[in-house]
Amino acid sequence: MFSLFLLILMFSFFLIFFSFLISFKSKKNWEKMSPFECGFNLVNFPRNPFSLRFFLISIIFLIFDIEIILLGPFIFNMFTTNSFIWMVLISVFLFVLVWGLLHEWFLGSLNWL
């Protein structure tokens, strides 16, 4: 039992040592290793202006993501109960969803460049 524990311990130390040997950090990878969060660099002055474009795209993503989550129960109820009311409700919901998407598209909020 002790020899198995010793073997596992030696193997884990070997793997840790081997990972330190093969993982080198160079100046080429410095940009990949630097933190970048919420559309701005964390090393800069904290009072720099926030990118409003990043904020708008994230809000649009959240709105459409929540609408897709709300679409699931509509589809499930449509197949379990054959009701005309569910068809009308899902049609109105999809109309509002597509209308909002086209509105954001024509305003130019969905341009990534």
Image (spheres, rainbow, N blue to C red):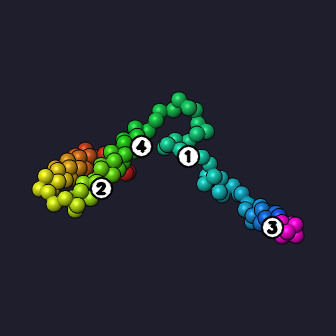
- Magenta residue span: 1-7
Residue 14 seen in the figure: no
Who comes first in sequence, dot 1 or dot 2?
1
Q: Residues within 10 Å of mark 2 (few under 14, many from 20)?
A: few
Give the labeled residue for mark 2.
72
Q: Which amino acid does label 2 sit on?
A: Gly
Check disc 1 and report the residue beneath it. Answer: 36
Q: Residue at x 30, y 55 (%)?
A: 72
* Residue type, numbered disc 1: Phe
Q: Real-space Cα distance between discs 1 and 2?
A: 34 Å
Q: Disc 4 designates what residue? A: 54
Question: How far apart in space, not on screen, are marks 4 and 2 (Cα)?
Answer: 28 Å
Could you tell me how far apart the alpha carbons at marks 4 and 3 are, in whole angstroms? 48 Å
Q: Position of residue 82 (x, y in %)?
A: 16, 60
Q: Residue placed at 27% from the left, 59% from the top? A: 76
Say which element carries label 4: helix
Mark 3 belongs to which amino acid? Answer: Ile
In the rendered view, tell whether residue 81 sits above or below residue 61.
below
Foreground disc of the pair 1, 2: 2
* 97 drawn magenta: no
- Sequence-wise, the earlier of marks 3 and 1 is 3
Q: Which amino acid does label 4 sit on?
A: Phe
